Image (cartoon, coloured by chain):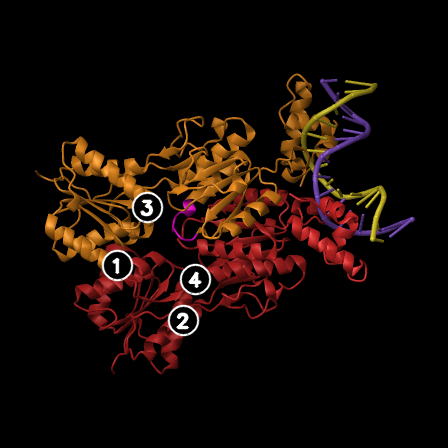
Chain colours: A red, B orange, C yellow, D purple
DNA sequence: TTGTACGCGTTATCAA
DNA sequence: TTGATAACGCGTACAA
C-alpha cells in the first residue's frame, strides 16, 4: 500500500503538496507542473488514499452501513445489494452490511450501535419488499435512506418501485392487446404492493371506459388452494387476460389454463411481475413480465445517501449509462421507480 | 459512544487499568475488586471498544472482506452471507462485502486492493456454486477461506457441501423405499456438483448390488428440451424413482409424470436438491429434498477465518446450538458439510 | 510551497 | 499493582 509520504519522496515534494494535489485543491496554490508530476507518480505507484487514516482528521470513514431485514427471504432481492455495492464502488464508498431478523428491536439497535462504532457515514435501511416502515430512534439523527420501503412519517428519503404503474402498465398492455375480460390474480397477504397494484389495475380499466368487476379479482396464497381459486375464476368469469401479482401467481394461471385446454399466449394473455425470477426463467420463460427495478433501487439509494453525506450532487460521469437515470437527486421524496415491461409472448392480439 | 476514558473517570482508575480489565489481561495484575468495579461501570455505560481506534495500535480492524461472485445469480445463496454475518456478529467482527462479476480479473484485484486499504483482517472468497477455484495472487499471502468452492492447489481452507453424499443419500433413500429403477436427472452444464453427485448415486446403487445403467441418467438443461428428455426417459426406462440435481429438474419430472397420468408420491418417488427454494415451496411443496447447507457454510467459514486470524479456537460458548457443529476447526481441509435430507412425501414405499 | 502539529481511542512501556 | 505517557497510523490544516 503506497502512502502519500512515498509519493512525496519520489516526486521530491512535501506531503502537504501531495495532499493538496490529490484532493484537487491545488488550483492557484501549487505550480501546475509540480501538480502534474505529483499526479503522475501517484498513478505510477497506484496510490489510493487510506480511508481509515483519512477518517482520523475528517471523521468520515467512507463506509456506509447497510441494514437489511432477512437478506435471504426474497430471492433476487440480492439485486438491491448488488446495485448498492456498484454505486458505492463508483462513488468511492464501502458497505458494511448487517442482517436483522426484522422482529427483534433490541437486536436492531445493537447492530446499529456496532455500525456507529465502526464510524459509518450513513445508513441504508432496506426492507425486502416494499412497505411502510418506521425508522428506529437510533437512526433518526443519521444520514439515512430507506430502500424498497417508505417512511411512515414521510420525512426520510426513500426509493421503491412504482407499484401503481406496475398495475397500470400491465393492465394497459392487456387492454391494448384487445383483452375484454382482464383478471387480477393478487396476493392474499396484506402487502403494500398488493393494494396499490390493484389501484393501478383499476385505474387503467376505468380510464378505458370499463367498469371494475370485483369477481375478476382473486387474491390467492399458495399451492392447491391458490390453484383452486384461480380455477374457479376461470370457470365463472372466462377471462381472456390476466395480470398476476408475481410469477408464482402466474404459474397458477398457466396450470389452471393447461387443465382447461387453454394455452397462454394463444387463447389467453398473461402479464406477471418478475420477482421470483426462477419461475419466469425455468417454468414459463415466455411469460411477459414487469421487472422490479431492484438493482436501480439499490444503486440510487446509495447515490442519494452519498450526496446527503457530502452535500454535493453525485458526479454525473461516475454513473453507468446502463441504468435508467433518476430524474433528480433533489426530486421530492419518496421516489418511486417506474418498472420495465419486458415483451415476451404471453400477451397476444385478441380479436374483439 | 462511551470511551475507556469515561469508564476510567467514573470508576476512579486510570485508562491503563481499564484497558487491562477490558482485554482480560488483569489476572494477577489488577486487584480483583478493582477489576470488578471497572467491569461494572463498563457494563453500566454500555461500553464496547472502538474497533477503529483499537486498530491504530493493533493493526487489526476486526473487519473481514467478503468477496462474492455475482451475489444475485443464485437465489438463496444469500443464506451463505446470512450465516457468515451471524458468525461475524457472534465473534465480534464485521463484514465488508464486495461483488465481482466473476469474469474480470482486473476488477477483482481492484476490489481486493480496496478491501486491503480498509485494513480487513482476512478474506472470504465465495463462489455461488461449488467449484474448483484458483486463488488470485493478491490473496495468496492473506488469511483466506474459500466458501462453497475448493482450492485447486489444495492449500487453502475451504468449506463446501458434501456433494458425494447428496447423491449417495438421495439414492439410498430411494433404494430403501423399495424403488427398483432409479433415474438420475442431472445438469447438462459441467458443474463440479453434477459429476460428484453422480458418483454418489452410482456408489449407492452398486453398494446395494445393482448395476449402473447409463440410460437411466439424463443430464438436462432448461425448458422444453429438458422436458422432452425427461419424457423420453420416462417412456423408455419406466423408472419408479428419481434423484434430481435440483428442484427445477424435479419440476420437469413432476410435469412429465403428470402428462403420463402418473402421480409423484404415489406411482413414482422423487428426491430433489433444494437450491432454488421457490419451486420446492410454491410448485411442488411436498417434494422430498436435500437441503444445501448454505447457512452453515457461511457460518463455519467465518469461524475458521477468525480462528486463523486470532490464532485461537472459536470460543464454544459463542456458537449457536441451532446448527450442526463442525467436527473440528483443525480438521483437515477442505471440509465438506453433509446435507440434510428433508422428509416430505414425494418418496413412498414401493412394493417389489 | 512546506514543516509540523493534530486528529482519535486504544494499547504498550516503564516508572513509581 | 497502578498510572502517566508515548506511541500507533496517515492524511489534513494552518502557520510560516
Q: Residue at x 65, y 36 (%)?
A: B55
Residue A44 in the figure: left or right of residue A244: right
The residue identified by callout 3 is B191
The residue identified by callout 1 is B223
Find numbered disc 4 in the image and state the secondary structure of the residue it sits on. Answer: helix
Q: Are marks 3 and 2 on the same chain?
A: no
Q: Residue at x 46, y 31 (%)?
A: B319
* Region in magenta: B72-79
Closer to the chain start, of discs 3 and 1, is 3
Determine the CA span between mark 4 and mark 3. 40 Å
Q: Are marks 4 and 3 on the same chain?
A: no
The chain that hosts pointer 4 is: A
Q: Is residue B312 visible?
A: yes
| Label 3 neighbour load within 10 Å: few <14, some 14-19, many 20+ | some
The chain that hosts pointer 3 is: B
Vertical placement of C2 versus A312: above or below? above
Q: Which mark is residue A58?
A: none
Amino acid at each position: 500500500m503506497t502512502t502519500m509520504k512515498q509519493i512525496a519522496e519520489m516526486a521530491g515534494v512535501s506531503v502537504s503538496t501531495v495532499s493538496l494535489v490529490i484532493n484537487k485543491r491545488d488550483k492557484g496554490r501549487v505550480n501546475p507542473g509540480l501538480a502534474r508530476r505529483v499526479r503522475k507518480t501517484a498513478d505510477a505507484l497506484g496510490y489510493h488514499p487510506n480511508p481509515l487514516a483519512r477518517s482520523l482528521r475528517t471523521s468520515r470513514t467512507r463506509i456506509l452501513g447497510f441494514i437489511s431485514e432477512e437478506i435471504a427471504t426474497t430471492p433476487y432481492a440480492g439485486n438491491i445489494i448488488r446495485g448498492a455495492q456498484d454505486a458505492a464502488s463508483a462513488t468511492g464508498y464501502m458497505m458494511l452490511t448487517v442482517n436483522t431478523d426484522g422482529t427483534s428491536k433490541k437486536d436492531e439497535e445493537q447492530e446499529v450501535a456496532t455500525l456507529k462504532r465502526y464510524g459509518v457515514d450513513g445508513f441504508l435501511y432496506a426492507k425486502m419488499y416494499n412497505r411502510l416502515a418506521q425508522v428506529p430512534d437510533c437512526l433518526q439523527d443519521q444520514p439515512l435512506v430507506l430502500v424498497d420501503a417508505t417512511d411512515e412519517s414521510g420525512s426520510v428519503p426513500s426509493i421503491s418501485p412504482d407499484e401503481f404503474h406496475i398495475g397500470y402498465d400491465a393492465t394497459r398492455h392487456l387492454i391494448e392487446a384487445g383483452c375484454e375480460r382482464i383478471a387480477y390474480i393478487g396476493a392474499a397477504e396484506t402487502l403494500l404492493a398488493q393494494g396499490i397494484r390493484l389501484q393501478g389495475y383499476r385505474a387503467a380499466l376505468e380510464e378505458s371506459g370499463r367498469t371494475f368487476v370485483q369477481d375478476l379479482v382473486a387474491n390467492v396464497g399458495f399451492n392447491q388452494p391458490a390453484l383452486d381459486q384461480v380455477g374457479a375464476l376461470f370457470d365463472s368469469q372466462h377471462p381472456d387476460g390476466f395480470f398476476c401479482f408475481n410469477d408464482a401467481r402466474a404459474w397458477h394461471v398457466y396450470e389452471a389454463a393447461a387443465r382447461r385446454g387453454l394455452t397462454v399466449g394463444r387463447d389467453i394473455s398473461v402479464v406477471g411481475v418478475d420477482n421470483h425470477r426462477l419461475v419466469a426463467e425455468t417454468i414459463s420463460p415466455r411469460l411477459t413480465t414487469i421487472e422490479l427495478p431492484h438493482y436501480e433501487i439499490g444503486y440510487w439509494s446509495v447515490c442519494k445517501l452519498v450526496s446527503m453525506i457530502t452535500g454535493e450532487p453525485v458526479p454525473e460521469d461516475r454513473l453507468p449509462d446502463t441504468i435508467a437515470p433518476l430524474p433528480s437527486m433533489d426530486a421530492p421524496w419518496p421516489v418511486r421507480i417506474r418498472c420495465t415491461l419486458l415483451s415476451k409472448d404471453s400477451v397476444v392480439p385478441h380479436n374483439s
